[in-house]
Amino acid sequence: MTAPDSSAPDTATAEASAAPDYSKTLLLPQTAFPMRAGLPKLEPELLARWARTDLYGRLREQGRGRARFVLHDGPPYANGNIHIGHALNKILKDVVTRSQQMLGYDSNYVPGWDCHGLPIEWKIEEDNYRKKGKTKPDFTDAAAMVAFRQECRAYAEHWLSEQRKEFKRLGVEGDWDHPYTTMAFAAEAQIAREIMKFAENGLLYRGSKPVMWSVVEKTALAEAEVEYQDFTSDTVWVKFPVASEGELKGATVVIWTTTPWTLPGNRAISYSSKISYGLYEVTEAPADNWAKAGDKLILADKLAEDVFKQARVTTFARRGDVPADVLGRLITAHPLAALGYSFQVPLLDGDHVTDDAGTGFVHTAPGHGREDFEIWTHHRRWLEERGISPAIPYTVDADSFYTAQAPGFEGRRVITEKGEKGDANPAVIDALIAAGNLLARGRVKHQYPHSWRSKKPVIFRNTPQWFIAMDQDIRTADGTAAPRPATLAGNAPDTLRERALAGIKTVEWVPAAGENRITGMIANRPDWVVSRQRAWGVPIAVFVKDKGDGTVEILKDAAVNARIAEAFAAEGADAWFKEGAKERFLSGLVEKPDHWEMVRDVLDVWFDSGSTHAFTLEVRPDLKASRPPEGNDRVMYLEGSDQHRGWFHSSLLESCGTRGRPPYDVVLTHGFVLDEDGRKMSKSLGNVTSPQDVIKQSGADILRLWVCASDYADDLRIGPEILKTTADTYRKLRNTIRWLLGSLHHDRPAEHVAFADMPALERYILHRLVELDGEIRAAYRAFDYKKVNAALTQFMNIELSAFYFDIRKDALYCDPLSSVTRRACLTVLDAVFARLITWLAPILPFTCEEAYIARTGDEEGSVHLLGFPDTPADWRDDALAEKWRQVRVIRRVVLGALEVERAAKRMGSSLEAAPEVYVSESALADALDGLDLAEITITSAATLIRSEGPAEAFRLPDVPGVAVVPVRAEGRKCARSWKISAEVGTDPQFPDVTPRDADALREFFAAQAAAQ
């Protein structure tokens, strides 16, 4: 019906007309906030709004004077489009910075990029040269070198620009107009200064060490650049004749190896004092066999039978024990002694030796393996005392050809330039046969290291490399002891390893297991290899003089260093490679400049990224932090768990070596992203989820919700079904926000109700806000976003939508305008909304901004400029919360009983019911005192009976003492609220509604008339 201008119709008129339409008198939700999000269209519009209103600048202005929480960006590599792992990483970082800002910090984020290194260089060679049939530049030509580096720089700049667009589209707020890059001239200058500091403090040295070497790429590789793939290797069992006098004279020590080509580099045999060894004699073997009857072999007892099987020995006999102390005194001859390997080969006791496979003895070539190198150098003094040279030969060159230090094999090759097997193995095996020292041969398929870029096998080869010493005392430039960091124990040596181990203990590790992981890596790592033999990088900008013994003297001249750094700052590191660079940097500062040579190696990119704190956190005014113990500012590093051996690791070493402390206060690590079945993503498997596709289809907020609903400390899974579940969760959250906005359309702040005057239910919801405020703040402080998401999802879906909103819809829609209950509810909804959109803003920045605009109409403001609202402590009421916990227990039984009735089609709406609720426990029944049970159960009436209830009553097994008989409500159905009541018809003016609705109608029409 159409309402009259001033008053409601009289009874006669009402009876004469058709049934009135009271729908327009209901205070139903009204909002322009759409049910369907349309995020793919909305999000770019909000990004444009934030750019237009300078949200980033306003956040920085807002944070002025606050304690700082700086998230220092671990630089992604400027190479290719972003993938789902990038999205996870950047979203987590954004949630950190947004939440810390809303917690009251000045939380700044400056994005960065890692721009040097082999991947870019490799891509330029592939795209600009190999594919075009062009010859790779000659890097000995200064102009060609600089031109090639310019190509690398342009490539990095292109992908930096592309990735920046994709990162911004994720909703990541930061200083995108002023990022940091490792290839910026100022950055290259500072990276050079940092390596100079290691030269000054005595830790930088040139040494010889076996490194994983890519023949195809012609560079040393870090462990992080290596992956293991199946590879078929030649295997040989080789006899080393005992040269010592005594009972074992004439016997041979047998080794087994999968790298015959390393035998020219053999200098020792490793054994284990924990293994049982014996002397064995061949008693019968085929006539054409390499093993002959009468041969005496020393083998691990556990492996002897298998060795003889491989050697096709028919029968053998064990002749006696060979104790460890005897082995420790043995000297053997090299199996290729006749070719010029006439030195002694000692036996060394090593923990790495096992009797799981092989012979129980390990062929030890210190130039071709980490463990070989370590046991050889560990015994250096012992070797020298016995007249054995500890020198490590360079048997293989950069192209994997044997050198003159591998007599008999010079010119043979291990791996070709295409990554295929060369002729080295066959040559060595043939020589062993000719020498009579091959016992057996075979092939084995096993996991072997390959370059992750070229996918070709690598080799271990001894090379001149630059190292930073882990266990050498740190000195000042003049050679005196450096000032000791406060973190070092009084008796601990002041070495890089000790500084780093002490520094680890000052950092908060999230999750806590990260501390043990990086501690183990630092405690056991060898010296840090910082050199690479490539073109695109920051050079090791030092000059050296050869001492004649394989070592070098490093020029330590502050004026020279300053001249180099100034040139780099003005021109970039290209200055080092330009024609006449040596003369430019030394002229007028150094006597006899011809005696000094420039180092041509570039720095490992891990040193670049490990130095980023030096040209960002220490230089930019908006990033400088007064960290503990001097101040309260904090710096966080956040990356994947692999960075314990990557960026976290290199940054720790770089900063501890030059500044005595870690560059960070908090380190957070996340797992990797797998598909829904827990498999690694692969284009060939067709299981790749790209962030671009998700954003295009569903929006960035869906990706962000997925991140924050996952346990990032472990590996995460994603795929169509998981995203579907995430979208459904989002839909429910959005609908809650939409209902709040619609209901708040009728909110009038002047009509808000004071806390003391509110009904118990409203005070209970405010109590829950107090509890949630503490939980949400604590979870954000602990970077536990899964907990934030779970708490808010549960609160919004279960406590609000399915409980509070469900109960209060009747009062909101149907109560009179003057109703205290209705106004108190709107007061609470306003408080709830203000908290929900700020608590959710770090996770769903687009949706919460949309809701903020819908609520406020503010074209210049932003939800992200709000902090988490203070929640009055006096809203907390634990006794009231316990009361409502008990009420909800009773309500659950009632709803269960009504659901049975609905399923049996005995009832439809809950308003058709007037249940009898039996509560036998007095304390539980008392919880309902002062409450309207029908209102709570959304029924037309309800009766509380303090007794056990009839046997046939509905009960829940986990709720003893509560029973429900679902009685049908009696009376007429209210034409407005649809409640069934005997009171319908008692109001003469509105005979088809309840008295409550009649009062509401009178107030509605009066207000309508007053407004006209």
Image (spheres, rainbow, N blue to C red):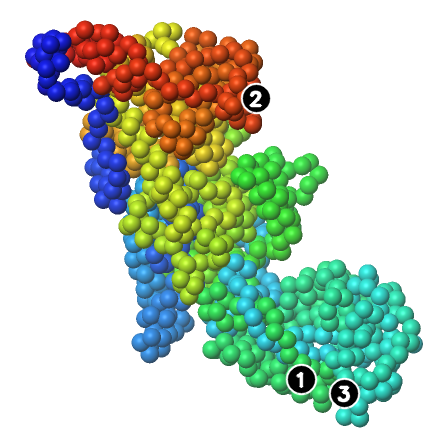
* Other residues around mark 2 within 10 Å, as few (<14) / some (14–19) / many (≥20): few
Contact between labelled residues 2 and 1, with CB atoms less than 8 Å apart: no
Which one is nearer the viewer's eye here, 669 or 834?
Answer: 834
Give the answer, above or below, for where 415 lies relative to 155. below
Which one is nearer the viewer's eye here, 490 or 321?
Answer: 321
Give the answer, above or below, for where 829 lies relative to 368. above
Residue type, mark 3 in image:
Trp
Left or right of residue 352, residue 116 in this image:
left
Residue type, mark 2 in image:
Pro
User: Do we see residue 135 in this rendering?
Assistant: yes
Q: Secondary structure at mark 1?
A: helix
The residue tagged 2 is 960
Q: For the residues marked 3 and 1, what is the alpha-carbon distance in whole angstroms?
A: 13 Å
Which one is nearer the viewer's eye here, 590 or 204?
Answer: 204
Which mark is on residue 429?
1
Residue 701 in which image quadrant = top left
Q: Looking at the image, is mark 3 or mark 2 earlier in the sequence?
A: 3
Q: For the residues marked 3 and 2, what is the alpha-carbon distance in whole angstroms?
A: 85 Å
x then y, percent, for residue 521 = 61, 50
Quadrant of the drawing holding the N terminus:
top left
Q: Looking at the image, is mark 3 or mark 1 earlier in the sequence?
A: 3
Which one is nearer the viewer's eye here, 158 or 602?
Answer: 158
> How many marks are shown on the rendered structure?
3
Which residue: 68% across, 71% down?
Answer: 365
Give the answer, above or below, for where 846 lies relative to 1001. below
Residue type, mark 1 in image:
Ile
The residue tagged 3 is 290
Q: Secondary structure at mark 2?
A: loop
Which residue: 15% across, 19% down?
Answer: 20
